[in-house]
Image (tube, helix red, strand yellow):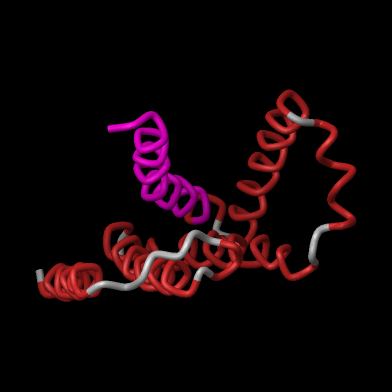
């Protein structure tokens, strides 16, 4: 496993932990949207520290960036708001399983078409089969 793979594995481990922690915070305070807001404040402060330490000059390039790229912020807000709201209802595992299927489908499409400047990697039968197997796995977890 490469260094980069290990970092992404850790990020993947963090997703259900994030979901469980923020869902618990939302239940505790009785407001999933407020819990999501707290998460974003903590995330913003953390990201700012890293950005200021690693590459503070990059902030000057923000105004020149294509505006559609800022949609990523809306998408992460949608993810955090929905996982904070829905995980306590259907369970963290179930919520994350559906997120994983969505990620696999979107990742395959992005790679296949080279969207947003991604490296092109055609959708093979093996990859499509893997996505289908994940969907079957989610279906089976819902039956348990």
**Which quadrant, please, contains the N terminus?**
top left
Q: Is residue 101 above or below residue 5?
A: below
Q: Count the labels in the image.
A: 0
Relative placement, left or right, of 127 versus 84 is: left
| Residue 42 x, y percent position in the rendering | 66, 39
Residue 34 figure quarter: bottom right
| Residue 53 x, y percent position in the rendering | 74, 23
Residue furthest out toward the top: 53
| Residue 7 x, y percent position in the rendering | 41, 34
Residue visible at 36% across and 71% down in the picture: 122
Observer-nearest residue: 65 or 84? Answer: 65
Residue visible at 36% across and 38% down in the picture: 5
Observer-nearest residue: 48 or 27? Answer: 48
| Residue 30 x, y percent position in the rendering | 55, 58
Q: Which residues are magenta?
A: 1-26
Q: Is 124 in the magenta?
A: no
Q: Is 6 in the magenta?
A: yes
**Which quadrant, please, contains the C terminus?**
bottom left
Residue 101 figure quarter: bottom left
From the image, give the main secondary structure of the stretch colored magenta: helix
Relative placement, left or right, of 33 versus 11 is: right
Residue visible at 84% across and 41% down in the picture: 59
Residue visible at 89% across and 55% down in the picture: 63
């Amino acid at each position: 496993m490469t260094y980069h793979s290990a970092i992404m594995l850790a990020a993947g481990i963090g997703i259900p932990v994030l979901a469980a922690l923020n869902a618990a915070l939302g239940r505790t305070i009785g407001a999933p949207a407020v819990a999501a807001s707290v998460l974003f404040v903590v995330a913003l402060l953390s990201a700012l520290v890293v950005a200021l330490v690693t590459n503070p000059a990059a902030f000057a390039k923000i105004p020149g960036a294509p505006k559609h790229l800022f949609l990523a912020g809306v998408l992460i807000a949608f993810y955090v708001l929905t996982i904070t709201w829905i995980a306590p209802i259907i369970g963290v595992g179930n919520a994350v399983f559906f997120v994983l299927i969505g990620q696999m489908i979107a990742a395959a499409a992005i790679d296949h078409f080279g969207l947003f400047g991604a490296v092109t990697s055609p959708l093979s039968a093996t990859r499509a089969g893997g996505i289908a197997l994940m969907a079957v796995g989610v279906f089976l977890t819902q039956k348990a």
